[in-house]
Amino acid sequence: MQFCGTQYLQVVHSAQNGLVDVALRIFHQMLHSGVKSVPVTFSSLILACGNLALIHLGKQPHAYVIHGIFTDNMFISSSLIDMYCKCGNISSARQIFDGIQSPDIVSWTAMIMGYALHGPATEALVLFGRMQLGNIKPNHLTFLAVLTACGHAGLVDKGWKYFNSMSDQHGIVPSLEH
């Protein structure tokens, strides 16, 4: 079977529409045919596995990443952090996060949300502080993660402090989700 750009798009489209089994099948056919994947293929596939909490399937594309295909790709690293966090495997997510030389806002937010949802929630706040010390500007999703952590840890006063700092210090208008 010959593969071209349409197969990459099929993997991405299938993954984005929750058809992880179809995306993985096409992905494996591509690999067995000797076609090298592009980063968006891995990133989309990994995100889809995370959204469906399918860690056993998400480990398959991760294995290819580990073997040196795209080890320094920020999109793939952030997707892996997101997947492992959504699947409740915070230690694997943290290991990937700690391996990133200069995490971006997506990586920080994914890791903060992982701790907010799967604990310890106070570690989310520690990471948020570290992020700010590194001059990474939080966005509305970062604050959603921080407020989630405060809610799960019962830190109402801190939650209000962070909520108020959104507009007062960061120029972010809180939305209904906040």
Image: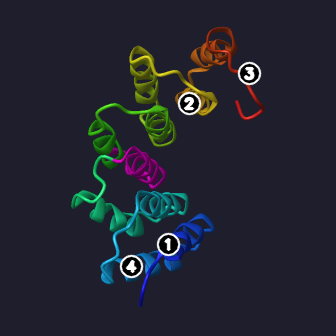
Question: For mark 4, does the 10 Å Cα neighbourhood hold few (<14), some (14 to 19), or many (20 or more) residues?
Answer: many
> For the residues marked 3 and 4, what is the alpha-carbon distance in whole angstroms?
45 Å
Q: CA distance from mark 1 to mark 4?
A: 11 Å
Task: Indicate which disc, 1 or 3, sits on the residue closer to the N terminus.
Answer: 1
At 55% across and 24% down in the image, what residue appears?
138
Q: Which residue is mark 1?
A: 5
Q: Which mark is residue 173?
A: 3
Looking at the rendering, the stretch of residues picked out in magenta corresponds to 73-91
Disc 3 vs disc 4: which is toward the camera?
A: 4
Frontmost residue, 171 versus 33: 33
Q: Which residue is mark 2?
A: 142
Residue at 45% across / 75% down in the picture? Answer: 24
Helix, strand, or loop for circle 4?
helix
The CA span between labels 1 and 3 is 41 Å
- Numbered disc in front, either 4 or 2: 4
Judging depth in this view, the residue of 3 and 126 nearest the camera is: 3
| Above or below 74: residue 136 | above
Q: Which residue is mark 4?
A: 30
Task: Name the N-terminal-most of marks 2 and 3.
Answer: 2
Report the amino acid beneath label 3.
Answer: Val
User: Label 2, label 1: how many angstroms apart (C-alpha)?
Assistant: 34 Å
Identify which amino acid the numbered label 1 is placed on.
Gly
Q: Give the camera-side residue of 86 and 173.
A: 173
